[in-house]
Amino acid sequence: MTTISTLANLPNLRPDLVDIPSEAKLAPVGGMNHPPRILLLYGSLRERSFSRFLTFEAARILEHFGAEVKIFDPLELPMAGSVLDTHPKVVELRELCLWSEGQVWCSPERHGAVTAVMKNQIDWIPLEMGAIRPSQGRTLAVMQVCGGSQSFNVVNTLRLLGRWMRMFTIPNQSSVPMAYKEFDEDGRMKPSAYYDRVVDVMEELVKFTLLTRGRVDYLTDRYSERNERARKAIDRQLQKI
């Protein structure tokens, strides 16, 4: 058996900046007695939008699980970069992101990808707003509706985007094929295995949101960023000499 000396083999590591994870450090911080706050985004502006119908169905299920939900209406949200970020719809979206502890993203599939409506909303959410990160550490559930046979192109893309936005995307997901068959005239989802999967996804989202909240600052604290802050502090001290 070969024994490896950790310190001897990590010459580039700064021991003073290394955090050794433990269960004690994962204890929740602060009083968290309010319902989980979930923001839902959908990716269509059509009057009879199945992604909107699925989003509202998910919202009803989340409320049943005790969550507080808010749904952003993407109508009249300008294209990213076309107006200042002081536009009322942009401000509304960003404030909702800051309010949220978890999110649900639901898009139709168009040309094998997410719609422009969906991507535009995500593009308006910055990785950083000064010292604030509107998306980092939020939980995320992804869903899609399909006009034809079942596909996973959209949920896969949404997972990629969620990772890029530094969100905790839950393992479960929902893809509803031939969505026009799955909703009644009032936009309510019919009983089916697809409906059951949506319940599964929302249940899992609430669980993961409860599991991570009060721990997000610790879960998203990174060695590389601590190291960068330390270097900048040294640079500031040198500039004063």
Image: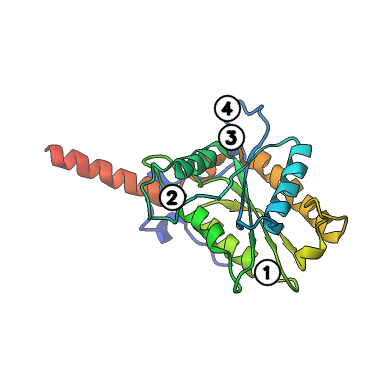
Amino acid type shown at disc 1: Phe
Q: Amino acid at mark 2?
A: Leu
Side of 239 where 126 appears, left or right: right
At label 1, counting other C-alpha atoms closer than 10 Å, the crowd grade (few under 14, some 14-19, many 20 or more) is: many
Pointer 4: what residue?
30
Lower position in the chain sequence, tag 3 or tag 1: 1
Is the residue 177 above or below the residue 228 in the image?
Answer: below
**Which percent across, then down, holds residue 122?**
51, 54
* Residue drawn 19% across the image and 38% down it: 237
Helix, strand or loop for disc 3 = loop
Residue at the disc numbered 3: 214
Residue underneath mark 2? 127
Q: Please state which of the two labelled residues, at mark 3 or mark 1, is closer to the viewer.
A: 1
Answer few, some or many: residues within 10 Å of disc 2's Cα (few below 14, many 20 plus, some between 14 and 19): some
C-alpha span from label 2 to label 1 = 26 Å
Horizontal arrangement in the rendering, residue 142 relative to residue 94 (left or right): right
The residue sitting at 76% across, 42% down in the picture is: 60
**Quick one: 100 or 32, which is closer to the camera?**
100
Which residue has dot 1 on it?
Answer: 152
- Give the Cα separation between the discs numbered 4 and 1: 38 Å
